[in-house]
Amino acid sequence: MIRVMSFLLVLVPLALILDLAHIGGHSLVFVTSGLAMVPLAAFLGVATEQVAGYTGAKIGALLNATLGNAAELIITIIALREGLTSVVKASIAGSIIGNILIVLGVSILAGGVRNGIQRFDAQTASVNATTMSLAVVALAIPAVIARGGALRPSDHDIERLSDLMAVVLIVIYGLYLLFTMRGPKLPSEPEAHKPTMSLAMATGILASATIAIVVMSEILVDALEPTAASWGLSDFFIGIMLVPLIGNIAEHLVAVQMALQNKMDLSLGIAIGSGLQIALFVTPVLVLVGWAMNTPMTLVFNPYELTALIAAVLIAVLISVDGESHWLEGAQLTALYLLIGIGFYFVP
């Protein structure tokens, strides 16, 4: 896998050349820079795993989730700087939906086909699902208040509401991390593997991959709007379906790999844990970054995004009840993601 990704690294300088020399048009630049994120995300994941060998399993898992979302955080901050708040919100919703439906769905499907019925710790999965439900309810509150008709607050008050809720969400995420870090070790929880490279080398790869992701993200966002126009796609569709898939590619690959190895606690932890981090940390950080950049970023999501978020979380809660999964559940999650994508394609 890494050998293949090494060959794909050629896409990074290629995207840079196409953008600087204005060769091939916006669509080619968009596709090339988007595909260049795949090997960069893969190397980011490998380096994170190596660092985890030095820091321990729990800290390594947190580092993996954080840096796994680094690409999308960078993309959305750049889009926010360009004033594309609707794309940023769509990307947030799409990332949560994607992690719960397509990442978890494909993982359960692939793992179920290979291993049959798979079991995981229902208590941990329930805590994750409950926390995710809380996050989605919190994200829905500003949208409900903003559509209050005659009782609707002013735009300024909605911005302040979002800022205050962002602070609360970050505190909740901190408490969630404290709980999971201090919680008992599961019998099935794997120890961090022995690293095969030095800490300095792993850290260097982390830094290099992150810098390259920043550059590719800048190119990707610049080409987003003209590409959407030329393809006949809305900014909303690209933001909610394409950007999250590109930004979270590392987590997608690792979650499926863990499911194939019958490590469902880890696979669910990656899929659900990443969605939690997006909802409770990345989203409020973007709200506060928007405030700092004087680019108002509220937590008012549109009805399409909220409906999909609620449906995805409901499915996650149902799957967490019995502590086991099979391939049909994975197929159902994947099908729901495709149905939502088809519906979003027709949203102008």
Image (tube, rainbow, N blue to C red):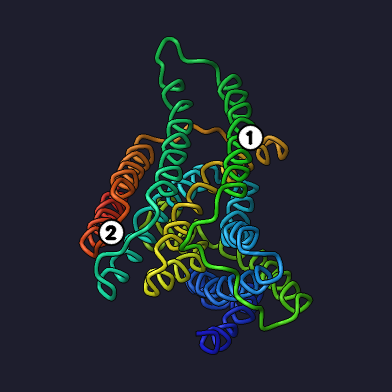
Q: Does dot 1 land on a helix, a strand or a loop? A: helix
Given residues 241 and 113, the one toward you in this image is: 113
For the question of whether residue 222 can be seen, the reply is: no
Residue at the (56%, 42%) spot, across then down:
283
Q: Residues within 10 Å of mark 2 (few under 14, many from 20)?
A: many
Task: Report which residue position mark 2 lands on.
Answer: 325
Front tag of 2 and 1: 2
x and y, in percent, of residue 312 in the image: 33, 46
Q: Amino acid at mark 1?
A: Val
* Residue 274, horizontal then vertical, whole percent: 51, 54
Q: Which residue is mark 1?
A: 171
Query: Which percent across, then down, holds residue 218?
Result: 63, 62
* Image quarter of residue 107: bottom left
Q: Position of residue 327 (x, y in %)?
A: 24, 65
> At 50% across and 74% down in the image, what residue appears?
35
Q: Which mark is residue 66?
A: none
